[in-house]
């Protein structure tokens, strides 16, 4: 039994991987731009603008998109079970990263405290960059989710079920074997107690 999805071909998966790499590189470049932008601020009366996304380095998480995209491209050419499982795990990680990064960006854009007038322009530009990055997160989420769903077309589910059944049988056999050992040990203890009682009675 296999989950087949003929609409997603190897060429389409390669395109998805390339788009992931491009998104990841763009995020890393934007992180470098924001780093230079915020480091160039001047400490005034109202301080500098340092949002939570800058402190957490969420744009730098684009490296995960680059790595996932590279594995996706390679998995499209070499469709081995281990490669597909590894790539699917990375894409699931990217889904989690996009959700967290988008949440932090929304928190940043929903609050804006007063900053020094000298840093207002930099803060405004940084928030615009965050808005652009926020628009790219749904695209990365959709790509990672699409690959995670379509990758089941290359995974033999019957072998996975068989391996799970085999592991379950081994665990149950081990538990039964331990129970038999405990019962045998209990019987031996009872035998020793009865022999001891007989010896004491004869004495």
Image (tube, rainbow, N blue to C red):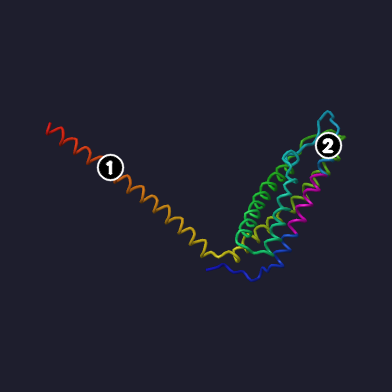
User: Who's the residue at 78% across and 48% down the image?
Assistant: 28
Residue nearest the viewer, comparing 145 with 173: 173
Instruction: Choose top left, top right, bottom left or bottom right for residue 86.
Output: bottom right
Q: Which mark is residue 140?
A: none
Q: Which residues are magenta?
A: 19-32
Instruction: Choose top left, top right, bottom left or bottom right for residue 71.
Output: bottom right
Give how far across and how far down residue 185 sits, in percent: 29, 43
Q: Is residue 159 magenta?
A: no
Q: Quadrant of the C terminus?
A: top left
* Label 2 crowd bin: few (<14), some (14–19), many (20+), radius 10 Å: few
Q: Which mark is residue 186?
A: 1
Q: Residue furthest bottom?
A: 6
Mark toward the start of the polypeptide (2 vs 1): 2
Instruction: State the CA–CA distance, disc 2 to disc 1.
Output: 73 Å
Residue tagged 2: 39
Q: Main secondary structure of the magenta part?
A: helix
Give how far across and how far down residue 73 sits, in percent: 71, 61
């Amino acid at each position: 039994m296999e989950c087949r999805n003929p609409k997603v071909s190897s060429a389409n998966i390669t395109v998805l991987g390339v788009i992931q790499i491009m998104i990841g590189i763009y995020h890393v470049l934007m992180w470098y731009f924001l780093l230079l932008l915020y480091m160039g601020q001047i400490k005034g009366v109202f301080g500098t603008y340092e949002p939570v996304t800058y402190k957490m380095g969420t744009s730098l998480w684009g490296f995960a998109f680059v790595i996932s995209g590279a594995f996706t491209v390679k998995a499209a050419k070499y469709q081995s079970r281990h490669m597909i499982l590894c790539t699917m795990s990375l894409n699931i990680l990217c889904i989690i990263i996009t959700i967290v990064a988008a949440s932090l960006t929304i928190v940043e854009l929903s609050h804006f405290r007063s900053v020094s007038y000298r840093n207002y322009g930099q803060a405004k530009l940084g928030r615009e960059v965050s808005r652009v990055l926020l628009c790219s997160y749904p695209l990365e989420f959709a790509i990672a989710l699409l690959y995670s769903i379509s990758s089941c077309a290359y995974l033999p589910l019957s072998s996975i079920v068989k391996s799970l059944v085999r592991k379950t049988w081994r665990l149950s056999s081990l538990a039964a074997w331990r129970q038999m050992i405990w019962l045998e040990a209990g019987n031996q203890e009872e035998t020793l107690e009865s022999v001891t009682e007989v010896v004491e009675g004869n004495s």
